[in-house]
Each structure stands twice: as structure tokens, then as C-alpha cells.
Image (cartoon, grey):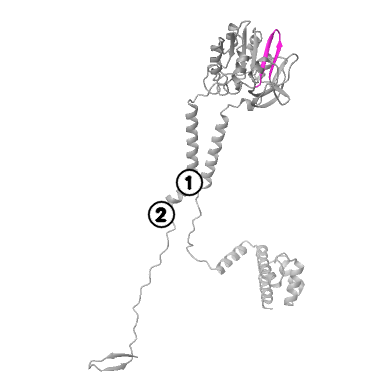
Amino acid sequence: MSLSPDTTGDTTARPSEPVTPEPVAPEPETSAPVTPTLRQATARTWRSWRGALLLALLVLSGAILIVLISGENEPGKELDPADGSLVGSRGLAELLGEAGVRVVRVTDAASAEAAATDDSLLLVTHTTRVDSGELGELERLPGDRLIVGDSYYRKVLAPQLSRKDDARTRSRDPECVLPAAARAGSAYMGGMTMMTPTGGTACYPAGEGHSLVSYPYGGRTITVVGDGQFMTNLRLGEDGNAALAMNLVGTHRTVIWLTAPDDTEGEQVDLAGLGGRSLTDMIPPRFGWAAIQLAIAVVLVALWRGRRLGPVVPERLPVVVRAAETVEGRGRLYRARRARDRAAAALRSGTRHRIVPRLGLGADASMDAVTTAIATRTGQDAHQVRSALYGPPPADDAGLVALATYLDTLERQVRDS
């Protein structure tokens, strides 16, 4: 009840009139768009690719740094007296010139024969390239010989010398009485190790062999060192490397330094004199950098192709399918294919999955245990229960329907008992 004034000003009790609310229009349903906006797609792409872009930037920066450090695209010529790179030997050639030694750089046997004298030294390195027909000319040259590294022509120019093994190149002590090595002291030696011929002297032991061997042969002195890195511009100023190089090379008035030709493109190399060189010895020195860059490129391609589809995007289903319709659709598929065996197996598996826990058995319970427990609980015949749960598939559709009915009865009895 509520009080309201009338037209005469008296206050009387009147029943309040019901107030009918105004209908409110339902707000339209809104749904988030499934397709991402341009900003979302850009942010997602950046998050997916920022790691790969950073790695690519690091690889590019490393390549630029390598080019800047190397200075030139043309690699240095190893143990070349005219090369000023880290692997060249221009520093040693200049030291020999200051000491009054004449250094003759030749690239073939004819030039070496023209410059050879009785007081000359033939210097042959593992980078030397001459035809096999010129070996006889080199072998007949007068004067001493210095063979650096495992040269192609070691067996011809340094006979009676046998190779032993390979050793890591590092600073080593001479441990011998050879004046050239004893006065120089420790040096950066290693590489090929050799056995000492009769009457020879061996220095710088490495394993069971030595990396420097000097011995007389045919009225001359032949000296072989296993690695020539101590003669390069990079190592010349370390330990006694410069002293050892000068003592070995600078004892003659003329040094005939046999090197590879300036233009070796398309050169035919005689492989008959490779000696003990392995396949890895013939790999270019910068092959490692190329292999690393190739591996990084493969990883980047794998990341690119592996993430090309992007993350999984959830989408709303256009309709909601009831579970009964799904079961009915699957049943129709079984019927169309006459797959009564698969349908019966699915029914039996589902029934066992729901009944076994109610019987207090484990999931790995045996067939006999399950059959006995169901027969005891429901009072059904044990043989009939076994046939229903583990028997052969039905022979026709009517048998499949009867099986489904019986399994449903069993499950209901177990549940209600």
C-alpha cells in the first residue's frame, strides 16, 4: 500500500498500480574476428623471425669482419718469399737479403737449374708444383737441399728418409747437437715426423720420430723439416724461429726458392708423388670458414621452412554437433562398410572400460578375472559374459544389435548392483 494525494488534498490509502517495465532490446552478439589485424600480424611475424634475423645479422657482420681483416680477397701464398701475408715468407727473404744471401725465386726446374751453383741451396716446400718430368732435373742440381713439409717430391729429393707419423705443431726444444738447431733453441715445430737415416742428426722430437732431420747423401747435405710454419711471417718473431730459419737457409750464398707458379689456374698436378699426404692435407686452408657458413645457412633455412605455417589459430566451429549425432554418423559409416568386427570391438572396449573400475579391478585385469567378477555381481552365466565381452564378431547386423543390447544390460546391472 502507498499514500497518494487526491484532488481535494485529502490523503487516503490506495493500492499502488503495478509498473510495467519497458522492453529492452537485446544487445547484438559480438565475436572477435578470427583473422588477425595488420598490426597483430606484424607483431606476430616480428616475434617469430627476430631470432633468425639477429642470427643472419651476426653472420653478415662476421663475414664483413673477415673481409676487413684479410684485407684482400686474394689469399696469401704459403711459404712464398714474395708474399707479405701471414702465411707468406717475405720477412725471412728480407732477413736473408740483409745478411748478404741472394734469394732466387723460381717456379720451374729450368729456372732452378740456371741459377744453381755448387754453393747454392735448393729450398722446396710442400706448396711447390712442378711436372713429374722435371724431377730428374731437380734431383741432378748441385748443392744442398732443404725440404720443408711433406713435399710431393720428398721421395725423390730426400731418399733414404722414411716418414713416421704426424704431430701437433707447437713450440719444441731441439734436444740435439745440430748447430743450426742447438743455437736457435726452441722453435715452432711439428707436422710430419721422420726416422733418422744412418749418419744423420735428428732434432725436435715429437712422439717416436723427429720433425727435423739432417743427413749427408751423395756429397751434399739434405735437411728435411716436418712443418714450415716457423718460416712464415706470422711465426717468424716467436721463440727461436727466425734464428732457426736463418741457420738452415742463410748458410749459403744463393738460395733457390722453388715456389708455385703465380697463375696456377687449371694447373695439372701429378698425383703420383703425393707420398703420405692424406685427403685432408689437400683441402684449402679456408675451407673451414666455408663449411661453417654453409652450416649456418642450413640452420636458417630449417628455421624458415619449419615455422612457415605459423602458430595454430583457434577458430569457432560454425555449428555445434550433438554427441548422439556423432555416434550415429560413425555407426552409419560402420554399417556402410559392413565393419561389424570394428563396431563390436568398439562396443566391447567401451563396456569394459566403464565396468572394470566399478568391479574394483585394475585396467590390466585378465579376461578370467573380469568375467568371473561380472558373473558374480550380476548373476549372469559366465560363459555368456565371456562370449559377449571377448567372443568373435557377430555374423550379421541382428547379432550386432543383440550384442549391444546385452552389453547395455550388463553395464546397467553392474552399475545398479
206, 267: nearer the viewer: 206
Residue 360, image x, y percentages: 71, 71
N-terminal of the pair, mark 2 or mark 1, is 2
Inspect the magenta stretch and tell me whether residue 215 lies in it.
yes
SS type, badge 2: loop
Residue named by callout 2: 37
Instruction: Name the amino acid type tagged 1.
Output: Trp
SS type, badge 1: helix
Near mark 2 (Cα within 10 A), the count class, few <14, some 14-19 or many ≥20, is: few
Q: Magenta stretch: give its range.
A: 212-226
Quadrant of the drawing holding the N terminus? bottom left
Quarter holding residue 353: bottom right
Give the overall secondary structure of the magenta segment.
strand
Q: Which mark is residue 148?
A: none
277, 190: nearer the viewer: 190
Badge nearest the viewer, 2 or 1: 1
Residue 202, image x, y percentages: 71, 18
Q: Residue furthest left?
A: 8
Q: Residue at x 71, y 72 (%)?
A: 359
